[in-house]
Amino acid sequence: MAAPGPSRQADDTRADWETPAALYDQLNREFHFNYDGAANEINHKCDLWFGPGGCFEDAFQADPIGDVVWCNPPYGKRENVCDPDKCKRETCRKRGSHCTEFKPGVEDWVELLSLWHSYGNTVVACLPDGTDTDWFKQAYDTCSEVRILSGRVPFVGTTSGNTGGTIIVIWRQGPKTPAPYMWLWDWRKGV
């Protein structure tokens, strides 16, 4: 699931798009997830989750050890708290309100997921296909595997989908491989 937060989307859509069951179920059969790393009380896929109503309200305060974590974080850019009296951000103007709490971006999530892996966890993340970004380079440098998904993922809660494509990044328990295995995965046909 994706916890509430910023995302790469139209201004009038939600940021807590759920992973479709067909995609999640295939990955869960393969990995047997213990935790959903970015969820809330409505959209969590595992009995234990990090986010509102979960075992940690804030995923960035969680420190799983030796577990298997699923994470579909919000797809968005970092947004820092603004001063309403001085703010000139276009984002705040369009939203009609100011940012009152820090909102992590995809780069923050990738850093967190890599950190969780360093604690001995297997971490599987559903991320936007951003091979041209700095956060993708960080994910590539620290992960074991990248699956480039063939076909548009029909996220629950939206009619538009992620127009940039989707990847599954996997940090497997154990030492880092010299280079991650990258492959095209038609998730609609299974593993």
Image (cartoon, grey):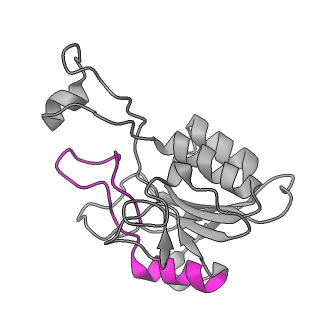
- The structure residue drawn at horizontal position 23% and vertical position 18%, both measured from the top left corner, is 87
Report x, y in % for residue 15: 31, 54
Nearest to the observer: residue 160 or residue 125: 125
Q: Is residue 157 above or below residue 30?
A: above
Left or right of 191: which side holds 79? left
In the image, the segment drawn in magenta is 1-30
**Dominant secondary structure (helix, strand or loop) of the stretch shown in magenta:** loop
Left or right of 157: which side holds 93? left
* Residue 75 shows up from this direction: yes
* Residue 129 shows up from this direction: no
Report x, y in % for residue 54: 43, 66
- The structure residue drawn at horizontal position 49% and vertical position 66%, both measured from the top left corner, is 55
Image quadrant occupied by the N terminus: bottom left
Is residue 132 one of those drawn in magenta? no
Report x, y in % for residue 123: 65, 63
Report x, y in % for residue 81: 34, 28
